[in-house]
Amino acid sequence: MWSSVVEVKYKVGEKVKVMKAYPLGHVRTPFYIRGHVGTIERLCGSFPNPEELAQMRDGLPAQPLYRVRFLQNEVWPDYRGGPADVVEIEIFQHWLEKA
Amino acid sequence: MSDRGKYRPLSYFQLMEVTLRELLVEKGLITEEQVNATLEDMRRRTPERGARVVARAWVDEGFRKRLLENGSKACEALGLDVPALKLVVVENTPQVHNVIVCTLCSCYPRMLLGIPPDWYKSRNYRSRMVREPRRVLAEFGLEIPEKMTIRVHDSTADMRYMVLPMRPPGTEGWSEERLAALVSRNAMIGVAVVQRPATS
């Protein structure tokens, strides 16, 4: 679909950590999830990097985009709810590292 | 257009919209006809589209499987234009309740549900749904039992989400049209469940 695509690094079920970075500009990784560990739920496909698109560039090579599942109890220390409650978030590969 | 005859000054955003649109038209980048056609398109998309998809999934097991596997492709088969690779349908079960939010802005499955309600775009909903979903759902009148899992979907990037609600008991043998009429917009966002009307 895109002329150049970054190679897919992670498999479904693999544990990943969201980078704790605070770059300037347009970013699609919510603050509240940076630094947290989750599990790859699925690969959504590869899409142009939104941080580049926001600068009027083509966003290529396209970045793999994953849905990552996080346990609510680990995200919010004072979370009130079931132990299996989760939040699932789309995160681009360049924001993830092996956990 | 409403309140004919009454003078109301334009709000900041209305003024911005008019100014930007007139500039774009003046410079020949877009035409008024294109703007109107786009508005018409947006108005044509209503939650009835999503309800049709849900009702089909309830009566057709094969369609349900295809919908959960590839939402965009399954909707295409119903003659609905949904951008490829973009739609993820998440299924409610007796064990799991799903709910949709976009904490970064207000991403919404417009292709199936139309224009989002104002509360969906509010800071209150967006910040609290990820943090305390059970309390927010209770404010919508939906109490989720502790033993059920809540899955919050934060649509932060290219995907759009729709909840496939559970089919209410007592609707066996109902036609697709009759079932579709039960499915509310809120049930497809995940802040309500589908109920069979008490009478009938």
Image (cartoon, helix red, strand yellow):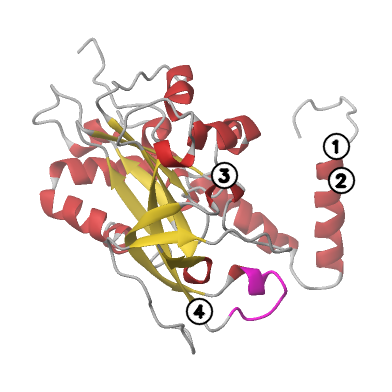
Q: Which residue matches tag 2?
A: B15
Camera-side residue: B89 or A10? A10
**Circle 3 residue:** B103
Residue B120 on image: x %, y %: 56, 36
Categorize mark 4 by other alpha carbons within 10 Å: few (<14), some (14-19), many (20+). Answer: many
Q: Secondary structure at mark 4?
A: loop
Q: From what the image shows, is residue B5 above or below residue A19?
A: above
Q: Nearer the viewer, residue B28 or B53?
A: B53
Residue at the farthest bottom position: A3
From the image, tell me which residue sits under label 1. B11
Residue B42 vertical placement versus B192 (above, below): below
Which mark, residue A73? Answer: none
- In this view, the mark in front (3 or 2): 3
State the CA–CA distance, disc 2 to disc 1: 6 Å
Q: Which residues are magenta?
A: A51-59
Figure label count: 4
User: Residue at the spot x=34%, y=42% of the render?
Assistant: B163
Mark 4 or 2: in front is 4
Q: Residue at x 64, y 35 (%)?
A: B123
- Residue A71 in percent (x, y) is at 37, 42
Disc 3: CA contacts within 10 A as few (<14), some (14-19) or many (>=20): many
Crowd tier of the residue under label 2, counting other residues whose Cα lies within 10 Å: few below 14, some 14–19, many 20 or above: few
- Amino acid tagged 4: Ala
Where is B24 relative to B100, above or below? below
Tell me the kind of residue under disc 1: Ser
